Image (cartoon, helix red, strand yellow):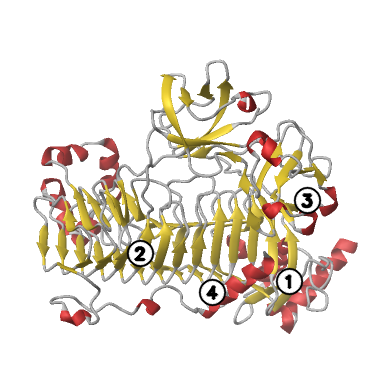
Amino acid sequence: MKTQVLFFTALSAMCAPAASEFYVSPNGDDSAAGTFAAPFATLAHARDVVRDLKKAGPLPKGGVTVWLRGGVYSMRSVWNFGKEDSGEPGAPVAYRAWKDETPVLSGGWTVPSASWRKAEDPRIPAAARGKVWAADVKTLGYDGLEPDGPCGFQMPKGLFRILSLYRNGRPLVLARHPNKGFLSITSVPDATNRVFAAADLGDLAPWTSDRSPELQALGYWRYLWADQTIPVTVDSANRTFKMNQKNPWNFPVKGAPFYFQNSLCALDMPGEWFLDRIVGILYLRPPSDSDPSKDRYELSRAAFTFLRADGASHLRFEGIVFCTGRHHGIIVDNATDVAFERCVVRNFGGTGIYLRDARDCRLRGNVFHTFGHKAGVISGGNRRTLTPADTVVEANDVSDTGRAMHTYSAGFSIGGMGMRVVRNHMHDLPSSAFGVGGNEHLFASNLVEDVVLESDDQGGVDTCRDPTFRGNRFVHNIWRNIGRGGDYVKCGQAGIRFDDAICGNLIYGNRFDNCSYGIFGGVQIHAGRDNVVRNNLFTRCRYAVSFTEWSMKRWREYFEKDFTKAYIKAVDGPAFRAKYPEFAAMVDTPMNDTVEYNILVGGEALIRTMATSATVRGNVRLDSVPADFSSVPGFDPLPPESAIGPGNDPILARAQASDVGTL
């Protein structure tokens, strides 16, 4: 009887004029009316009330808004949406932060401040003894003690589950050795069984299984663009290390860089931590050797995606903080007119947001940072019919991806057909800012700086292998401080990198500043055809453009490979051939890219290793950036630097304020 009364109470509220608005609060009650004075308690209940409202008839004119009051909503299960939870054209269903309050959807587990004790354990390095603290988190109720999921290039990810510790919302470093940089493999006594050796390690007893039973090694084992994290065991008698997993990408080679992690024996620096999962003890050397009881320490706990939607449409999520999970943050599939605005998505072990098969969707003015993998994967549209997704990714701030998987962990991976990626600020990333696949995407007015900070053979834009990726435009962006060079750059780092047969794209009106390392220019083209590099400014670049040319024999052989045939089969048809007439003759086309009317200030050479059939004209080398671009023949003026990136975008500014307020 009580259930019936509650149902009819909710139904009466939904039929009233105020039914276009509901309220949720962490201090609410799901048996309440959902008003400002009597809010619901859970997001799932609010969704269900809106679902029932929709069943009763058309949504109110202008749609429905669920207002989320400020506070922390502890995530214990997935917030699911389906087709039945959709809004209607012109009447969306919106989940919005109330005024200037900040709703925080958190999967974190806070270490009680009173639980910290000075640690006494013989495994603690001598330099840190007396400075390491411990908390028995298992006894206190923390249950995320299972091992992390597999991590690294071409490793099956399954449930991408990565544990992290945060101090006041900021990530700390899993105990590692050395504390910075890498060790190098000095020899490989048994490659088949993945046995290798390294120098400068001194006493190996700390790394043996009795003292470091969960020891891992993160390395660029075979290629400097493919990292993997592998469990290892130590043979102290023979001074060798053995990987406990085998795959084609962790075949160790002499000189490969790696470091150890996940051992109490490596916990020697302020800001490092280690969780002994076997007994459930968390060890910490606090930053600046401070008292840990004075700060908020959180372990990521939730091993599921916070928000999932499949087939939903006409939804809005605004002003919400999604944070602190071990898996992905948000997954939205088969979506039409779904928008995320001024949200904060941070501190996830996997990827921040997947927006797949998206049509007319928007990511606008959000903050994304601190992920084990990527900030976002966005795809949509139909490449065979060349139907655009018309999805916009605008004025977002993206940083600190690839904390667990260092390579191919772009800020945003963009795929499909017809996306607009504009005015974003991409910065402080170990890998690329944008991974690009598909056709007719526009990347315009983005500010990209301090990316590709670790991996070799990468670019601020990275796109590769598929010769049908055509029609993409990179216009009026700034690429600054891309790559950092160093001992482990054998190939190169570039601002924009077209790798392995990328064809038919435009790079126009960009500024490349300090974007050329190794043998790569600010733009690197590897065997592609029909690309145009026009009207760009290169400063502090060794080379403006670099080519890597294939012989016609190798080029034609590429089209006989099964994966290339599959790429072509996926899009080949009347629409594709009409849009790209050069596509039909591609297999017999020489490397005919165009480089024209670009400016290189200083540098070593405009072009490194000229492609045989490239068209090169109107390019100039100058001693300084001209005060008036119109003084350079054929060069179109560039927009002012202040026009690039989000600037003082008011929507993003509100998201950034929310982020700071919850850290």
Q: Which of marks 3 and 4 is in front?
A: 3
Q: Do the residues labelled 4 and 2 touch (CB within 8 Å)?
A: no
Q: How far apart are marks 1 and 3 (CA)?
A: 22 Å
Q: Which mark is residue 638?
A: none
Residue at the spot of label 3: 111
Q: Measuring 33% from the left and 67% from the top, which residue is drawn there?
A: 442
Earlier sequence position, callout 2 versus callout 3: 3
Q: How crowded is mark 4: few (under 14 residues within 10 Å), some or many (20 or more)?
A: many
Q: In this view, does 294 lie to the left or right of 498?
A: right
Q: Which amino acid does label 3 sit on?
A: Val
Q: Measuring 52% from the left and 75% from the top, which residue is drawn there?
A: 89
Q: How crowded is mark 2: few (under 14 residues within 10 Å), some or many (20 or more)?
A: many
Q: Closest to the observer: 534 or 27?
A: 534
Q: What residue type is labelled 4?
A: Leu
Residue at the spot of label 4: 652
Quarter in which the C terminus is drawn = bottom right
Q: What residue type is labelled 1?
A: Gly
Residue at the spot of label 2: 479
Earlier sequence position, callout 4 versus callout 2: 2
Residue at the spot of label 1: 70
Q: Are marks 1 and 2 in contact (CB under 8 Å)?
A: no
Q: Distance between the residues labelled 4 and 1?
A: 19 Å
Earlier sequence position, callout 1 versus callout 3: 1
Q: Residues within 10 Å of mark 3 (few under 14, many from 20)?
A: many
How many numbered dots are placed on residues in this image? 4
Q: How far apart are marks 4 and 2 (CA)?
A: 21 Å
Q: Position of residue 82 (x, y in %)?
A: 60, 59
Q: Nearer the viewer, mark 4 or mark 1?
A: 4
Q: Which of marks 4 and 2 is in front?
A: 2
